[in-house]
Image (spheres, rainbow, N blue to C red):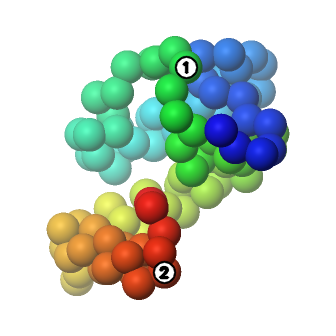
Amino acid sequence: MPWIKVIQEWEAEGELKEAYERMRQVNIDYNDEMLAGMPANPGPHPVTPPELASLNPLSMLYGRLFMMHVMRGPSRVTPAEREMIATVTSLASNCRY
């Protein structure tokens, strides 16, 4: 349970709901099959990193755009290699994500 307030997709309204919908489209645009295939409004679930910015929908959306561009955008480094770099970096930093 996070110590800060978060609003998950299933309980979002207005601007935040639109931001969640746009994030889902970003996943599709970057051909991220795993994220794009997730059900809309999945109901209560463990908090995800993007949801930590849910009180600021614009920063949540831009954070997703940035992350998807870095991880799935054009590069000489393959998406698998980028995931490997992220995994090793998280491990070295004792980060669960």
| Residue 74 pos. (x, y %) | 31, 70
Sooner in the amino-acid sequence: mark 2 or mark 1: 1
Q: Is residue 39 above or below residue 3?
A: above
Residue 43 picture location, percent across and down: 52, 15
Q: What residue is pinned by disc 1?
A: 44
> In which image quadrant can residue 26 be found?
top left
Q: Where residue 53 sits: x, y (%)?
A: 72, 47
- In front here: 41 or 73? 41
Image coordinates for residue 10, horizontal then vertical, percent: 59, 16
73 sits left or right of 84 in the view: right
Dot 2: what SS? loop
- Under mark 1, the amino acid is Pro
Identify the secondary structure beneath mark 1.
loop
Tell me the residue at 51%/27% (across/down).
45
Q: How many marks?
A: 2
Q: What kind of residue is marked 2?
A: Ser
Crowding at dot 2, Cα within 10 Å, few <14 / some 14-19 / many 20+, comes out as few
- In the displayed structure image, the side of residue 47 where residue 7 appears, left or right: right
